[in-house]
Amino acid sequence: MKACFMGLGYIGLPTAIIAAKHGVEAVGVDINPEVVALTNRGKIHIVEPGLQELCAEVVATGRLKASTVPEESDAYFIVVPTPFRGNHEPDIAYVEAATKSVIPLLKAGDLYVIESTSPVGTTEKMKELIFARRPELKDKLFIAYCPERVLPGNVIHELVYNDRVIGGITPEATEKAKEFYSQFVKGKLHATNARTAEMCKLTENSSRDVQIAFANELSLICDKAGIDVWELIELANRHPRVNILRPGCGVGGHCIAVDPYFLTAEFPMESQLIAKAREINNYKAFWCTEKIKNAMLQFKLDHGREPAVAMMGLAFKPNIDDLREAPAKYITTRVMQGCNNAELLIVEPNVKEHKVFKLTDYREAFKRADIVVYLVAHDQFKTLPKDPAKVILDFCGIFRKVR
């Protein structure tokens, strides 16, 4: 089988590589010619453990090639971003554009699957778009929705071993999609319809956002009450039916920080808890920013000079290079905008360079800093001492107490 993957980002590229590794002839399509050229050299443009070696292997064997335009295939996978516009309304323009680009190539019996996070009803809209332009294919295509559910940093394992939810426009489409994914997925393939599969993806990430909001709100309460929130959560989680997540400086990534808005935009009256969770998690980043600014002001009052401040981490979670919707990036930007003459040392060990931030090695930043702000719990940071001579602001539990 030949499969065309529309989008070579954090999900599309690993999926194409894994499929190619399991015998699929894969074509990866991206509008960025640099990504295409890099992929065709067996290189990857993202940080993901083990993926570089797999990419080099499947490119060398001819199982994977990249292009800026789609090729006629047996299956087409839409794996492009779904950002939101103003007022947090989801934007499916990329899904629509990718779909339009493959419509001329479709033939009877082909499989078309959307993996991109999408509002409920998107798969049906794309079905209507396809048949409006190719009416002769009506009832002759297999159209389905199958959301990804992987964790950056562990994508290779999770693409293979995680369960998948597959929802077809018809039961036959569901079975056709299951047949494709069964080539490399060892987890269970759960059959449903397209609308339920779309809602499942949004539900999973909205649920996690609500759970994180509880932890973040708890951290605000504990800060005011003079309680170590990390110790508190460790103790509360000893209850057999309690499992509180860890607080942080907000919520980031292109899933948890985005997907709940797909529900609040379409179901505003029915999604009030979800909306409030988004509000709390966004506020946590603002709260952290104010904490840092206050610490900088206090340092200046105490020492008669501006402090050197190390902002430790920009990614949205530990040990990855993904900065999408990262609260640490937002916080760093806000602090940078109002830091006056203070020296700001910005650290992200998983990124070599950044077009906005001048990056500093984490050891040098720690050494030079008067105030050390831990925004992301990267493994490298855990090797640094808790220097009593420095002001330490730990928003991610680097020094949390563990019983």
Image (cartoon, rainbow, N blue to C red):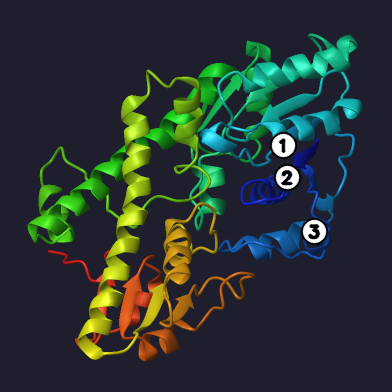
Q: Is residue 326 left or right of residue 129?
A: left
- Which part of the image, by quadrant, shows the N terminus? top right
Labels 3, 1: front one: 1
Q: Is residue 206 left or right of residue 325?
A: left
Q: Is residue 241 left or right of residue 258?
A: left
Q: Quadrant of residue 386?
A: bottom left
Q: Which amino acid type corresponds to the residue marked 3 in the rendered image?
A: Val
Determine the secondary structure under disc 3. Answer: helix
How would you rate the neighbour count of disc 2 (Cα within 10 Å): few for under 14, some for 14-19, many for 20 or more? many
Question: How far across and down, in percent of the image, does residue 348 sit?
Answer: 49, 72
Q: Which amino acid type corresponds to the residue marked 2 in the rendered image?
A: Gly
Q: Which residue bears the numbered disc 3?
A: 59
Q: Which amino acid type corresponds to the residue marked 1 in the rendered image?
A: Tyr
Q: Is residue 174 left or right of residue 375?
A: right
Q: Which residue bears the numbered disc 2?
A: 7
Compared to 147, does 39 lie above or below?
A: below
Determine the secondary structure under disc 1. Answer: helix
Q: Does residue 396 appear in the picture of this structure?
A: no
Q: Which residue bears the numbered disc 1?
A: 94
- Which part of the image, by quadrant, shows the C terminus? bottom left
How far apart marks 2 and 1 lie (CA) works out to: 10 Å
Compared to 258, does 360 lie above or below?
A: below
How would you rate the neighbour count of disc 1 (Cα within 10 Å): few for under 14, some for 14-19, many for 20 or more? some
Which residue is more in the foreground, 210 or 39?
210
Question: How far across and down, in percent of the image, does residue 351 sit?
Answer: 57, 71
Looking at marks 3 and 2 on the same chain, the residue that comes earlier in the sequence is marked by: 2
Residue plotted at (73% across, 17% down): 127
Q: Are marks 2 and 1 in contact (CB under 8 Å)?
A: yes
Q: Are marks 3 and 1 in contact (CB under 8 Å)?
A: no
